[in-house]
Structures are given as structure tokens and as C-alpha cells.
Image (cartoon, grey):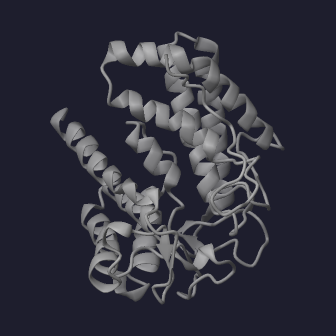
Amino acid sequence: MRDYRLRTCSNLDQDGQDGQDGQETSPQAAATLAATLAAKEETQALRFVAQCWPAVLAVMAKMQDFDTDNDGMIENEGFPDQTYDIWSAKGPSAYSGGLWLAALQAASCLARLMNDDIHEKKFHALFRKGQRVYEDVLWNNTTDCYDYDGSDSAHHDSIMADQMAGEWFSRACHFEGVAFRSKQALKTVYRTNVLGFQNGTMGAMNGMRPDGSIDTSSMQSQEVWTGTTYAVAAAMIHVGLKEEGFRTASGIHHSGWHHFGYFFQTPEGWNCRGNYRSLGYMRALSIWNMQWALEVEQRKKDRG
């Protein structure tokens, strides 16, 4: 039988960075499990959850080590501890924090399936507690979105295309979402990172400054990531921004197929000059999340 244990770290990542303390892998594992269950029949789901449940508990316990002040929200540590490993974050962050909240929702749901009342209540309480921190620390009324992180760095208030990654995961699992103002934030991303960069013809720029310039604080902040753009598009569809979502995704098709000619060698990303990194990269497969978003929203309509 296949071993479904969920790993809490992944040693060296594709950029050669030490990802030993990766803060996204574990939350994504729990949320991905819940998303998988959403597509399975009930009998299959229960068997699968039972098999994975001890590993989920271990993963969530490990992640709580990153909540250094016990406020329900994990903190980034200012070094490569998430997939934007060159674009480091410190303190609570929109990306890692959102994924953590989605993982807490998923873990609470899985606990309910396992008739584990103690953990169901524990993870739900942590979710509500962390959600308040997420809103209070990261929401920026000036930019009308969530800050990159809660530090005092020069780029802490950059507008990150992927800031609603947790919202996307949550809604893909049929949950309520993690951010109170997700639609507002994604409208800002669309206006700033999509239309504000090459008029939406190249995808969503990872990082933009509040003044409309590209965040040049790192290599990754000034790249368009193909898979991230598709994930952002899926998140937009989930919150009712269907037209904006397809316009966002169209930039990858326009540039990848018609302008740069990458065709079936779609890279991880490119910069404003079209210089690519990592041809034939898997991240672009997240285009299928747009299809899933459409199906999830259609199911909601069908249920009335």
C-alpha cells in the first residue's frame, strides 16, 4: 500500500536553497488533502483521511513551532522559508499566513471526519485567532490589499500577486475563505500587478510597489511566474471575478505562445524583458485550478 505520510520539509529546493524549515509545504499538504477529499466519494474519503490523520496531526504540531508569540499566526523568519526563497519575508506574511489559515480550516474539517472533537475545536479556534492577526497586521487601507509581510523592511508594503494563495486553497476545498477582504485585495492585484504591468499581456508581476513600479528588491519579486498567475486567476474566479481571472491568465498564453514562443516548454517565469527561468516547469500545471474553480462555483449555483 502506498505510504501517504506528509513531509514537513523538503531539504534543498530547485534554487539550491536550504528549505529545511519551509513554512508552506506543511500547510499545503493538509489543504491539498482536504481538496483531494472534495473530489472523492464519501467512503473513499473516510478511508483516505484515516490513513493520513496521524501525519496531519504531526504536520500541524510542527507548524505551531513557527507561531513564536502564540497569537495563532505563524511568523516567517527572514530567510528562505517559503517558495519565494530569495524574496524573504519576516513576521506574519500574506502568503505563508494565508496558507496557514487554510491549513487550519482543513485540519478542523478532517478532525470532524475523524470524530476528533478536541482537535476540531482546537484548529477552528486557532483559525479564528490567527485570522484576526492576519487582518489587523497585514491589511493596508492605503493600497487596499494585504502587505507582503508585517516587518519594517523597505518592501513590506509591496503588492504581491500571490497574496491570496490561502484564499485560493481554502475555496478550492469548499471552505469559506481565509481573508475578510479577499475580493478587494484581488481587485488591487488585477489593477496593479496585471493591468499595471504591460497592460496585462505578460501575466501577473509577482511584486509591485504602491507607486506602480516593479518591486526590484529581489530577483523573484520582479518576475512573472506562470503557475502563480494561473493560481491568482483561479482565486479571482472563486471570489466572483471571472472576467478578471481569464484576462489575468490570458497574459501567460499571449506571451508564452504568441510573443516568446515557449509553447510546450512553458517556464517557471520570465521578467519584463522575457528572459526565462526553468523551462518546462511543473508550476504552470496550476492552470487546471481555473477549471476546478469554475466547477466549484457551478456546484454552489446548482445547490442554490
- Up the image or down, 242 lies above or below 11; here it is below
For residue 118, say whether it is visible. yes
Q: Toward the viewer: 254 or 73?
A: 254
State left or right for residue 28 relative to residue 61.
left
Rendered residue at 46%/31% (across/down)? 34
Q: Position of residue 140 (x, y in %)?
A: 60, 68
From the viewer's perspective, is residue 28 above or below residue 124?
below
Any part of residue 179 in sight: no
Furthest residue in direction top, as rendered: 115
- At horizontal 56% and vertical 37% (from top left) the residue drawn is 29
Left or right? Give the position of 265 relative to 133.
Answer: left
- Please state the horizontal and vertical placement of residue 74, each as a whole percent of the image: 72, 46
Marker count (numbered): 0
The quarter of the displayed image where residue 188 is located: bottom left
Question: In the picture, which quadrant includes the C terminus?
Answer: top left
- Who is closer to the viewer here, 282 or 161? 282
Please indicate whether residue 93 sits to the left or right of residue 304 in the image: right
Residue at 71% x, 55% y: name it: 92
Residue 137 point in image, percent of width and height:
69, 58
Q: Which residue is painted at 24% across and 66% down in the image?
A: 243
Quadrant assignment, res 85: bottom right
Residue situated furthest right in the rendering: 69
Up the image or down, 220 lies above or below 227; here it is below
Q: Nearer the viewer, residue 225 or 300?
A: 225
Residue 237 to residue 65: above or below: below
Q: Position of residue 177 (x, y in %)?
A: 45, 44
